[in-house]
Image (tube, helix red, strand yellow):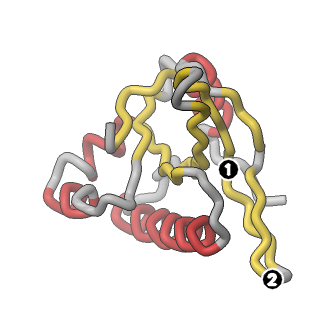
């Protein structure tokens, strides 16, 4: 089993505080003989009329010396997971969960803004100290 990200429990707590129910830890999908383990599956009742919203969350800490290198790795994983979910008709939105410091350092500059122009790329920004969700992109 893959090692959990250092913020794994932090994101679980933050999602719980925001009204989400963790349904899968990890969220596993098979592609042929290969098993992919995305960090979390979660759902939340929107309303009786609209039903349940379901998501998959991949958590990244960005702890290496190069935040750009971490971003490249996270994006590669995100693109692969996104394609797998789409190809298998899994009706869940994929989100990359990142600490607020990463959002500030990478997604408030031109490089990050360029990535956020894609409608298939979704972020959850969390406060690692307070263990709360700060921002959903798109909202």
Q: Dot 1, how many residues are within 10 Å of its Cα: few (below 14), some (14-19), or many (20+)?
A: many
Establish if 114 lies above or below 58: below
**What secondary structure is marked by label 1?**
loop
Residue picked out by circle 2: 32
Q: Earlier in the sequence, mark 2 or mark 1?
A: 2
Residue picked out by circle 1: 39
User: Where residue 118 sits in the image (x, y, percent)?
Assistant: 28, 63
Establish if 131 lies above or below 36: above
Of labels 2 and 1, the one closer to you: 2
Q: Is residue 45 left or right of residue 64?
A: right
Q: Is residue 138 left or right of residue 43?
A: left
User: Where residue 90 sits in the image (x, y, percent)?
Assistant: 65, 60
The residue closer to the viewer here, 82 or 108, is 82
Q: Dot 2, how many residues are within 10 Å of its Cα: few (below 14), some (14-19), or many (20+)?
A: few
Identify the residue at image location x=71%, y=48%: 4
**What secondary structure is marked by label 2?**
loop
User: Where residue 23 sits in the image (x, y, percent)?
Assistant: 75, 37
The residue positioned farthest toward the bottom in the image shown: 32
Establish if 100 lies above or below 35: above
User: Where residue 7 sits in the image (x, y, percent)?
Assistant: 60, 38
Answer with the quarter of the image where residue 89 lies.
bottom right
Q: CA distance from mark 2 to mark 1?
A: 20 Å
Q: Is residue 71 left or right of residue 96?
A: left
Identify the residue at image location x=19%, y=55%: 113
The residue closer to the viewer here, 49 or 79, is 49
Q: The C terminus appears in which quarter of the rendering? A: top left
Identify the residue at image location x=34%, y=42%: 137
């Amino acid at each position: 089993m893959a090692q959990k990200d250092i913020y794994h429990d932090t994101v679980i707590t933050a999602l719980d505080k925001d009204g989400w129910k963790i349904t899968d830890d990890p969220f596993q999908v098979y592609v042929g003989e290969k098993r992919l383990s995305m960090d979390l599956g979660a759902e939340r009742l929107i309303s009786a009329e609209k039903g349940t919203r379901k998501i998959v969350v991949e958590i990244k800490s960005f702890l290496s010396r190069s935040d750009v290198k971490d971003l490249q790795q996270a994006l590669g994983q995100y693109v692969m997971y996104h394609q797998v979910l789409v190809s298998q008709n899994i009706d869940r939105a994929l989100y990359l969960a990142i600490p607020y410091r990463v959002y500030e350092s990478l997604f408030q500059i031109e490089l990050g803004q360029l990535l956020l122009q894609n409608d298939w790329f979704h972020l959850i920004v969390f406060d690692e100290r307070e263990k709360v969700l700060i921002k959903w992109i798109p909202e």
